[in-house]
Amino acid sequence: MAGYEARRLENIKRNEALVKDLGLQNNVTSPSRGKQKIKDQIQSPAKRRRLYINSPTRSSARIANALSKQPATKDVQDESDSSNNRPRKGQAKKPSSDVATPKRSTPEREPSADVDALIEKWSSWTLSAPPPTRDVEGNYHFASHPQFTPNKSPEDIIREGSFGGTYWRPYYSRRLRTTITDDWKELPSEWTEGLDVAKYLTSETADPEVNKYGVICGQSIEQWEAHGWIMHEYDVRGWFQWYCRFWLGRRCPDDDRQVKRWKGCVGETGRFRKTLLKKYVENGIRSVADEGDDDQKGEVSPVVHQTCHHWAWEVRQEALDRFWAESK
């Protein structure tokens, strides 16, 4: 166990230094600066820190078989789908009892060889892309995927309040028969500095007061897994974990699928984006600032607002102006 812990601490220190050196903070990067840095970044590969997970109850052959038989994922279906089991504003929501994380009373053992291989597949990757650039409207741009233009960074989503504070809680993967825990520590320390981790990241109970828009939306991670929306080979927690790693510079075979899902939810013609903008028009709200002044923020579909926030997008004035013009 001591050897495993020593390797983990070494990886953490190395990655902390890498993030600091590359300047992967939540700031604006001009296109020219991004291009100038790409060579140095690609020449500085970083082995991502390892996740902490409990040992599985089956062998590596069982894990490989489970992954090969994983149901086909739906390209666009939302992990944060707001149409199911939606609580009222201010109402707390606990993960469904039938998929609750099982309690383990026995001490954790050092991961076996098959678990080590799975950990490496999830979290050991080399930096292969520069930080995003940001345009005057606040949209981020990634050279590898020009159509992927979120306007919220992973740090924004975490600090402003998301997933009821439960996204990084320990959860038991029925497909892998493994409990995933403490993988939030893979995040750059700058993203979580000063935050109450137990409240904003690893809470067992979804708290609507944690979320930016004061409501709970969507389903549990266990339900995402049951629906087949998670590609276990890459990101065991789903879309937002993928976005964190994509932002930091990882590129993987699942990128195109995840970008396609984002476009279907909050891209230019995404269903949640269109639904939200239609609500503004229906309420006669032409300015994002007016929404706040008229105390309408809680009335213009807070559940869809929160869902869009989970997908790294929020209504900005330019998008609202364009939608009003197209609605005439």
Image (tube, grey):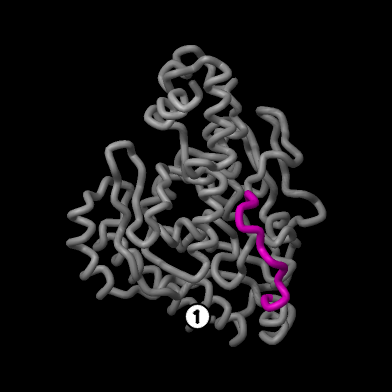
Vertical order, 157 against 209 (above or below): below
Q: Which residue is at 32% across, 75% downward?
A: 45
Identify the image quadrant of residue 19: bottom left
Give the side of residue 191 with respect to residue 230, left or right: left
Q: Which residue is at 52% across, 29% downward?
A: 277
Instruction: Examine the rendering and report whether any part of residue 263 can be seen.
Output: yes
Name the residue type under label 1: Tyr
Q: Which residue is mark 1?
A: 4
Q: Position of residue 151 (x, y in %)?
A: 40, 42
Identify the image quadrant of residue 213: top right
Q: Position of residue 140 (x, y in %)?
A: 35, 47
Query: Magenta segment: does it hold 75?
Result: yes
Q: Residue furthest front?
A: 328
Instruction: Examine the rendering and report whether any part of residue 10 can be seen.
Output: no
Q: Which residues are magenta?
A: 67-78
Give the side of residue 322 with respect to residue 27, left or right: right
The quadrant of the image that shows the N terminus is bottom right
Label count reads: 1
Q: Residue furthest top?
A: 294
Question: Taken as a whole, is the magenta stretch helix, strand or loop?
Answer: loop
Q: Position of residue 225 (x, y in %)?
A: 69, 60
Q: Which residue is at 41% across, 25% downward?
A: 321
Query: Magenta segment: does it hold 262?
Result: no
Closest to the observer, 175 or 115: 175
Q: Position of residue 250 (x, y in %)?
A: 41, 67
Closest to the observer, 111 or 259: 259
Is label 1 in a helix, a strand or a loop?
Answer: helix
Vertical order, 159 against 301 (above or below): below
| Number of other residues with Cα within 10 Å of mark 1, as a class: few under 14, some 14 to 19, many 20 or more | few
Q: Which residue is at 46% across, 70% downward?
A: 252
